[in-house]
Amino acid sequence: MISRRDFLQLAMSTTAIYGASSFGNWGKLSAQQLITQDKLLEFETFGNVSLIHITDIHAQMKPIYFREPEINTGVGANRGKVPHITGADFRRFYGIKDKSPSAYALTFDDFSSLASTYGRVGGLDRVSTIINSIRSDRPDALLLDGGDTWHGSYTCHQTQGQDMVNVMNALKPDAMTFHWEFTLGSDRVNEIVGKLPFAALGQNIFDSEWDEPAELFPPYKFFERGGVKIAIIGQAFPYMPIANPGWMFPEYSFGIRDENMQSMVDEVRAAGAELVVCLSHNGFDVDKQMAGRVDGIDVILSGHTHDALPEPILIDKTIIVASGSNGKFVSRVDLDVKNGQMMGFRHKLIPVFADVIAPDPYISNLIEKQRAPYASQLSEVIGKTADDQTLYRRGNFNGTWDDLICDALLNEREADIALSPGVRWGPSILPGQEITREDIWNVTSMSYPQAYRTQMTGEFLHIVLEDVADNLFNPDPYYQQGGDMVRVGGLGYRIDISKPQGQRISDMTLLKTGATIDPIKSYWVAGWASVNEGTEGPEIWDVVENYIRKQKTISLSPNNSVEVIGT
């Protein structure tokens, strides 16, 4: 019998025998433009355990457009490695044909033209169809939700997450973990979690006063599937009080807590676990580092950084799976577990092409029931995009949605400089497409939406940019504590990614005058999503809506205000 270690070493070079991803099958079909539901869902059942992974849905119940990032820069040991390659480099790495459905799903090039051909993606009624198909083949498959689920839309905000809770409950997950959910406030989170019909897991969610595991969020849960005792260990987003307002959930603390994770792995192994799965919201690079530090995890289902990878990667003995975001993909992982050892795996990243996957009628009706009380507000047209303008968010440094938000802040709040947080969530809008109120909320909805206006010195602005840059470009993934780089309006600068903290940002310029930012001079700065309690200002969605109404048609100038070097 081949040993587990030998299997995993061999798997890296001979995946066709020991472990495989069937992305290549639908990649070939895509190249031939022969996509059908049967082909998308086709899977050769393998082993005795199946995992279904969804993550980072951000309350997107309906099909959307979603453009993948143009820039995803890796640093340190992760420089040039997946997921930090994009576009043509990504397609070459995975053998994806240009302009194919695979290229549309996984890269950004020709996004608008390919979107007109291949249509919207996602929709929880289509996700349900995929889940039902997998369950028909493997009835005891485990459905695992990686978090960022009850956040990110108009109806989710209005119902304090209840719309997503209702729909997700109908999909019947077995477990989930958390991030943005906590920005509903701990009282609301506690209320929802107390009624969930499935496990709410987080080995790193602790009581902040006593520094003990929080009772409401057990670290793990056991399942018996295919004659195998499986432990699912939850890993919530580690940096909640840094990236989000800690005053909204003061009784909880987080952190990566490697030592506790190792203790939990050892504990479940001692209790007879034959397969250990970490349901994670760490982010991909953090998961890679954790896999190298914690022994005994078989599978990490990764979330937070919205990466969609056609194949798992292997770190020593651990398979890491990345399943994208916004309901755009569903991952299926089949595992062969014998005598307490993982002998092999099969994986498929299933793209949710909304025009190909038939919706589950029950879930469709349930979704419409959640949306019905808000139908007129959701559908109201506020403006449109120009015929050559795409609105998208993803990318390390800028996205046109945030360019628009910054323009709105500059004009509506009468500011010199605008700051917009580098969050990753938010669907895209195609050229010539109407912009509805729902679209605006899909990129602004949160529980701390105040658009502040304040004075900052040039020195303080430099500190802000340096701090955010270190969150993104610190070579140690455990110090990467946020999203992408803060977006700026009215301000230009140069960033050298190769430099240490405090030395990355230079040549800061006020765009309206061309003058160098003076460290001792104060500037009027408008922004939103401040983590500070008591922030005052109008809600960001109203600021953006008012601006779009005045503009009517949105056409943005190319944003060349940030010069990136050191890559």
Image (cartoon, helix red, strand yellow):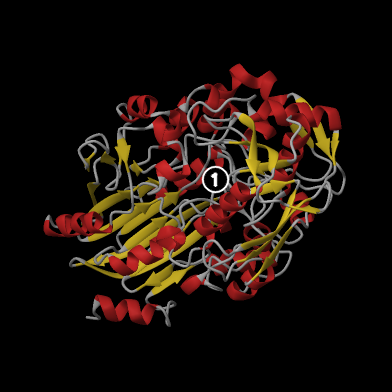
What is the total number of numbered labels drawn onto the structure image?
A: 1
Based on the displayed image, in which of its 4 quarters is residue 216 positioned?
A: top left
The residue positioned 36% from the left and 82% from the top of the image is 10
Q: Is 86 placed above or below 243 here? A: below
Residue 165 is situated, as x and y percent measured from the top left of the image, at 43, 30
Q: Is residue 365 visible?
A: no
Amino acid beneath label 1? Gly
The residue positioned farthest toward the left in the image shown: 270
Residue that numbered label 1 is attached to: 327
Based on the displayed image, in which of its 4 quarters is residue 259 positioned?
A: bottom left
Instruction: Choose between 77 and 43: the one closer to the eye.
Output: 77
Side of 256 where 171 appears, left or right: right
Q: Quadrant of the C terminus?
A: bottom right
Side of 367 where 198 appears, left or right: left
- Label 1: which secondary element: loop
The residue positioned 47% from the left and 74% from the top of the image is 77
Residue 447 is situated, as x and y percent measured from the top left of the image, at 52, 29
The residue positioned 49% from the left and 67% from the top of the image is 311
Side of 159 where 193 appears, left or right: left
The residue positioned farthest toward the top in the image shown: 373
Q: Is residue 543 visible?
A: yes
Q: Is 203 placed above or below 471 here? A: above
Side of 316 where 531 appears, left or right: right
